[in-house]
Amino acid sequence: MAIEIPSIAELLKKGTAAFEEKFHSAPELAGVAPGRVNLIGEHTDYNEGFVFPMALPMVTIVLGRKTDENKCRILTTNERADNPSYVEFHLPTDSEPLKPGKPNWANYIKGIVQYFDGPRVSFNAIVISSVPLGSGLSSSAALEVSMYTFLEGLVGHKTDTKQKALLCQKAEHVFALVPCGIMDQLISIHGEEFCATLIDCRIMDIVNVTIPASTCVFLIVNSNVHHELASSEYSVRRQTCEEVAKKLKRKSLRDVTLAELNKLNSSDVIDDKMYRRARHVITENERTSQAVKALKSKSIEEFGHLMNESHNSLSKDYEVSCEELDFLVKTAREVHGVYGSRMTGGGFGGCTVTLVEKSSVNDVIKRINDSYKKQADFFIVVPSAGARVIPLTS
Ligand code: GAF
């Protein structure tokens, strides 16, 4: 059975109860931000390429109220967050900026407080989330963006949305030490119901594309594995791509064609591994453009085929998949009614996304449950709205 995703109203109710218990007052508002599933265009964002994610119905919420005590107090209700679950810190000043430390979850909060471009404000707050943590569905960006949105609500200030995405990304780079691209923050801010979003990461151009009504759904399967090398290997991939672009005297792989890469390869300036890494990025950009065209012309089969090709390239050329993800993808593809299946997000564990006829979803779930050695979680997801403020008191 697929997991029932809690509604925002349910999360707000639980979060409000937790807030009242901890702070003995009522919260005034909530910042809400979704996780995302990337449909195609993986590991292309930091190469200034194209991505095609959609915002999820799973969200992170920061709710609370202003205080005048020059202190920020925040409790996470997320059981999988590292300890302690409650932190307090001072408002940053020029002479005393905030610094990252422990627990790790609070670094995302501190980073946002540090870089928020509105007036400084102290607060009491609670974090509550339905985005599975560390599963490639962008729980980090959902936390950053919900926190940023909460601060915007508290002080009545609205940052330009692209600037907001960049500041959230900066918080992740500097406070969580993860050199992520810009996809996750942009989709968490710009997501729209019924749409997936084509993002040109070079210029942060955003085009919402309606997903045509069909008999299909997107099924997310969480492998529930997370391999430790994920973050170190992410940085290595990023560096390799930059190195190849540099050898060709280009700003990024976005500007390199396959023919140019092949020519470079034949001159022995790059090794086979570098070649395959760059080939993934170049072909993935092409696949992403084609997938958007396929969706616009309602060619579900072609879209699914491109998802499959994307996974094969991520697994063989980019080598960011793993045994568990390859197994889940292969098993899903064996079921009649499946158009395409691929890993999603950074890789080395996390989730797959499968495009499947509604009538075949239970067959996929059964086939995986019968053969996967670990426990998988299943979510049927619809494209959902991006970040927003929800007032809580009248
Ligand atoms: C992670 C990163 F945070 C994104 O920026 C992106 O690079 C993705 O991995 C891979 O496409 O989610």
Image (tube, grey):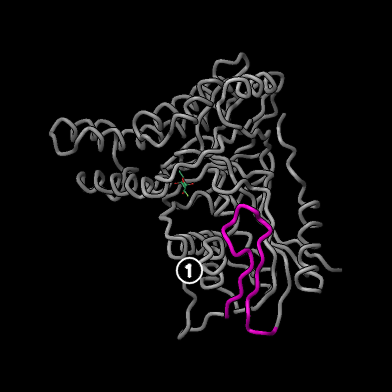
Q: Identify which amino acid the numbered label 1 is placed on.
A: Gly
Q: Observer-nearest residue: 62 or 45?
A: 62
**Magenta segment includes 80:** yes
SS assignment at label 1 = loop
Q: Observer-nearest residue: 65 or 263?
A: 65
- Position of 221 with respect to 254 (left or right) is right
- Packing grade of label 1 (10 A; few <14, some 14-19, many >=20) is few
Quadrant position of residue 377: top right
In this view, the residue farthest toward the left is: 267
For the C terminus, the quadrant is: bottom right
**Magenta segment includes 79:** yes
Q: Which residues are magenta?
A: 68-90
Q: Residue 52, how many percent across, how many down?
A: 52, 39
Residue located at (44% from left, 25% from top): 309
Q: Is residue 354 visible?
A: yes
Q: Which residue is mark 1?
A: 101
- Position of 33 with respect to 256 (left or right) is right
The mark total stands at 1
324 in relation to 86, above or below:
above
